């Protein structure tokens, strides 16, 4: 094969003209660049070896993960104790209130009329008592002089006792009416935050009808419904963790299992109290994940759950996958991960015991990776 200079010399006229030589020289260079065998072949990329492992199963312990709901440890539904229209609602949902603060006022005209009526009843009962006392004294004098019979004296004494009872009844009615007048103002029983309001100004309030819901912030708990078939497993768990919405896992400071079960859903309610520091930025109603782990299983009830190290799992957003070993390399396979304990994570679906996977999911995803 001729060199570039040789091709240029063979193609150039004897009397060279620079303008004529340039096109011939450019063509010669292009021919040399495209000549078979002239371009150097790239070197083969070096293979990356990734260690692998065989999927094992955990048979001595079991875990249980359930959805729970955050709720306040102290919550009160304030209801009206007097009938009437709501004149004013001084708070809205999300407002903070102090203990004793008036949060709603109900029309008190009906209660005021009741108090006035009870006052009149007391005055009337007192007058009847004075009249009965005077009548009794006169009857006793006439009886002592022998002008009337013993039966007349007994009747006067009975009328006096009835008048005394009437006055006591009237006074009790007045106290009840006065107390009812106090019920026209709804006050907060403790420092808290208004969770929801159930009535607005102008609505009709009635005894027992909720006005608003109040809760104490900073003291939250998780309520989780455990299936009755798994209640024993949850009760035997050595570790209980609450996975918060921000991804943190915290242990409850106190846990309680309610004694009864739901007859329809066949679930048992568990209440897990959070530490005050763990519930600072949380609000009631949020969904959390509760993990019961470390429960010992009987040999007859042992189950085979594949477990893998955390490094073998590839997590990208909502995707959780592993790299499974194949003849020519690795194949990405999506799996459903469960609870983590002892540095290993359960794989609930997508993987079987005995399969070989990459021990490092990040390295297995690089180009040229081989087992």
Image: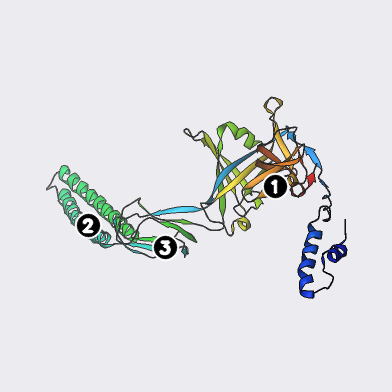
Q: Quadrant of the N terminus?
A: bottom right
Label 3 Cα crowd, 10 Å radius (few <14 / some 14-19 / many 20+): some
> At which x and y percent is residue 252?
63, 48
- Taking the spot 43% from the left edge, 53% from the top edge, the residue there is 77
Of mark 2 and mark 1, the one earlier in the sequence is 2
Camera sees residue 237:
no
- Where 226 falls versus 162 (above or below)? above
- Taking the spot 56% from the left edge, 55% from the top edge, the residue there is 219
Of mark 3 and mark 2, the one earlier in the sequence is 3
> At which x and y percent is residue 259?
54, 36
- 352 vs 201, nearest the viewer: 352
Q: Which residue is mark 1?
A: 314
Q: Which residue is mark 3?
A: 92
Q: Quadrant of the C terminus?
A: top right
Label 1 Cα crowd, 10 Å radius (few <14 / some 14-19 / many 20+): many
Marks 2 & 1, CB-CB < 8 Å contact? no
Give residue 121's mark: 2
Quarter residue 336 falls in: top right
């Amino acid at each position: 094969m001729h060199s570039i200079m040789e091709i240029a010399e063979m193609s150039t006229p004897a009397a060279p003209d620079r303008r004529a030589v340039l096109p011939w020289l450019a063509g010669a260079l292009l021919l040399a660049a495209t000549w078979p065998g002239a371009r150097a072949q790239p070197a083969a990329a070096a293979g990356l070896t990734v260690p692998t492992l065989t999927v094992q199963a955990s048979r001595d312990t079991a875990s249980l993960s359930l959805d729970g709901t955050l709720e306040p440890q102290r919550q009160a539904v304030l209801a009206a104790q007097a009938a009437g229209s709501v004149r004013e609602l001084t708070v809205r949902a999300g407002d903070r209130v102090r203990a004793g603060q008036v949060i709603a006022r109900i029309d008190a005209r009906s209660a005021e009329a009741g108090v006035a009526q009870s006052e009149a009843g007391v005055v009337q009962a007192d007058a009847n008592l004075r009249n009965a006392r005077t009548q009794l004294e006169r009857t006793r004098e006439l009886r002592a002089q022998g002008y009337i019979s013993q039966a007349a004296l007994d009747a006067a004494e009975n009328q006096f006792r009835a008048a005394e009872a009437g006055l006591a009844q009237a006074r009790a009615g007045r106290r009840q009416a006065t107390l009812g007048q106090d019920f026209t103002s709804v006050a907060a029983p403790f420092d808290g935050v208004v969770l929801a309001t159930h009535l607005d100004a102008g609505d009709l309030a009635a005894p027992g009808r909720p006005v608003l819901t109040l809760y104490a912030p900073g003291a939250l708990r998780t309520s989780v419904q455990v299936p009755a078939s798994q209640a024993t497993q949850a009760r035997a768990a050595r570790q209980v963790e609450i996975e918060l919405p921000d991804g943190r896992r915290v242990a409850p400071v106190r846990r309680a299992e309610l004694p009864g079960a739901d007859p329809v859903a066949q679930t048992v309610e568990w209440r897990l109290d959070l530490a005050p520091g763990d519930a600072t930025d949380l609000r009631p109603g949020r969904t959390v994940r509760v993990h019961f782990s470390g429960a010992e299983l009987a040999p007859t009830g042992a189950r085979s759950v594949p477990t893998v190290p955390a490094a073998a799992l590839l997590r990208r957003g909502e995707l959780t996958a592993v790299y499974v070993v194949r003849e020519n390399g690795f194949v990405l396979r999506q799996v459903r991960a469960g609870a983590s304990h002892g540095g290993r994570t359960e794989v609930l679906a997508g993987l079987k015991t005995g399969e070989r996977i990459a021990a490092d999911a990040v390295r297995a995803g690089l180009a040229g990776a081989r087992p």
